[in-house]
Image: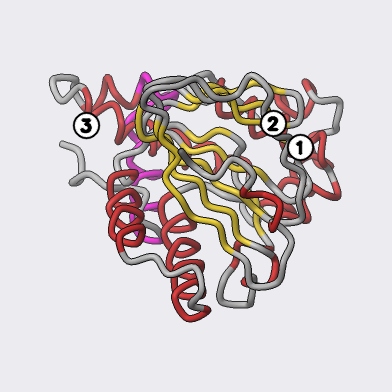
Amino acid sequence: MFQAWYEQRRDEKDHIYFARHEVKNEWFGSKPYPGFHNSIEFAFGLQGGVRIVINGEEHLLHEGEVCFMNSLEPHKFYYQKGVAVYIVLISQSFFTEVNRLGSISFPTHMAKIEHFETVKRYLDYTIENWDPESLLCKRAFADTLSYLMTKYYRFYPKEAVERHPGMLLNVLKYIGEHYAERLTVDAVAKKFGYSANYFSTIFNELMGTSFPDYLNTCRIIEYNRIRREMPELSACRAAELCGFGSMNTFYRAWNKFSLVSNIAEQPFPG
């Protein structure tokens, strides 16, 4: 059985908790231990469905999905028979100029992506060689995980959440749910009660990119997923399903993001 009270050491200096929680023959979670710490925590779904309540909001973590718990966010895990999950808790002392995890935040619940298998392979290898007493081992792990998470998953500056908690999280959630629609700066700004100019200024400042560029990033990522899972669809139809109004707009977005990131994963669409 896994260490149910692992968070008791959560704020100790140079502390990392890394373990595979797996429930084979019993139910655990009727009285879950509430986590609340000044560290960050990831849960990587491996098998079954783990129910996690974060800030009072319930999430069901499936295989290939990731949950992120920011510093001081209260959360509880509910485990049941047949589930497995990797838990990683990293204390503040590992956050440096190189390791960016202390200055950024991730969406609370991240859907399965193709590169989850890359992250999982690294976790599988590390768990076999894990030495919780070795500071060198823990530093290498924290830095490598930081690299993988920022390479493959969307993130945003932590101060953005602290300065504009309602605006940023709600806007990003809205974009994630409606990117396939004809979203405009004016329409989204109006929905959240801001003028278009103020909204654009704040969004650019907090995210380090413009609203249209961020929106197109989401669409390109979804385009890659659709073409990977439904290769029979034409590039034109896949682009349309992602919210691109024309192929010219799609090609401009594709070319832009393939030059500056690994977002454009697939070969140039024909």
Residue placed under numbered mark 2 in the picture:
54
Of the two numbered discs 2 and 3 on the same chain, state the one appearing first in sequence: 2
Q: Position of residue 201 (x, y in %)?
A: 78, 49
Q: CA distance from mark 2 to mark 3?
A: 31 Å
Residue placed under numbered mark 1 in the picture:
74
Magenta segment, prevailing SS (helix, strand or loop) = helix
Position of 248 compared to 235: left or right?
A: right
Q: Position of residue 248 (x, y in %)?
A: 35, 35
**Which residue type carries mark 1?**
Pro
Q: Position of residue 68 (x, y in %)?
A: 59, 42
Q: Determine whether the residue tagged by mark 1 lies in a helix, strand or loop.
A: loop
Q: CA distance from mark 3 to mark 1?
A: 36 Å
Q: Name the front one of labels 2 and 3.
A: 2
Q: Is residue 29 above or below residue 10?
A: above
Of the two numbered discs 2 and 1 on the same chain, state the one appearing first in sequence: 2
Q: Which residues are magenta?
A: 240-260
Q: Determine whether the residue tagged by mark 2 lies in a helix, strand or loop.
A: strand
Callout 1: 10 Å neighbours few (<14), some, many (20+)? some
Asked if labels 1 and 3 touch by Cβ distance under 8 angstroms, the answer is no
Query: Residue visible at 13% across and 20% down?
Result: 232
Q: Name the front one of labels 3 and 1.
A: 1
Query: Residue visible at 64% across and 72% down?
Result: 14
Asked if labels 1 and 2 touch by Cβ distance under 8 angstroms, the answer is yes
